[in-house]
Image (tube, rainbow, N blue to C red):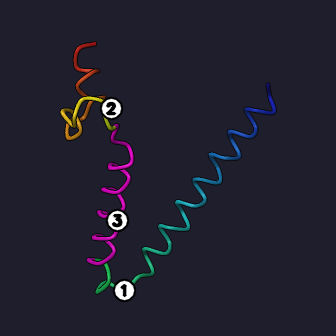
Amino acid sequence: MKGVFCLLEDLKEKKMELKERIKKEIDSIPEEYLVQLEEYVKILKNSIQKEKQVKTLHLHGKFDKINIRKLAYKYI
């Protein structure tokens, strides 16, 4: 079991290293490009949210534009 823990720690460290590299790259970008970068990040976040949406089957789209998970957890 210790091996799995080590693998998870390595993965966590690699993610942190990646974040640090990305932050350094952002810091090196000229200010005139920051607005474009912000727009790109917003587009990326929106695409991730769309991927997370659950499409309903056999309900004729009744719940396609509703966050089903949020609604379900509301009543727990």
- With 60 as the anchor, is 25 left or right in this view? right
Q: Magenta residues, as a range?
A: 35-54
x, y (%) of residue 24? Answer: 50, 72
Q: Nearer the viewer, residue 43 or 68?
A: 68
Instruction: Classify mark 2: helix, strand or loop.
Output: loop
Q: Is residue 3 magenta?
A: no
The image quadrant of residue 18 is bottom right
The mark nearer the N terminus, 1 or 2, is 1
Query: Is 41 located above or below residue 15 in the figure?
Result: below
Q: Nearer the viewer, residue 76 or 13?
A: 76
Crowding at dot 3, Cα within 10 Å, few <14 / some 14-19 / many 20+, comes out as few
Label drawn at residue 41 = 3
Q: Which residue is mark 2?
A: 57
CA–CA distance in space, label 1 to label 2: 47 Å
Crowding at dot 1, Cα within 10 Å, few <14 / some 14-19 / many 20+, comes out as few
Q: Are marks 2 and 3 in contact (CB under 8 Å)?
A: no
Q: Residue at x 31, y 64 (%)?
A: 43
x, y (%) of residue 6? Answer: 76, 37
Q: Residue at x 38, y 43 (%)?
A: 52
Magenta span: predominant SS is helix
CA–CA distance in space, label 2 to label 3: 31 Å
The mark nearer the N terminus, 1 or 3, is 1
Q: Nearer the viewer, residue 34 or 67?
A: 67
Q: Nearer the viewer, mark 1 or mark 3?
A: 3
Q: Which residue is mark 1?
A: 30
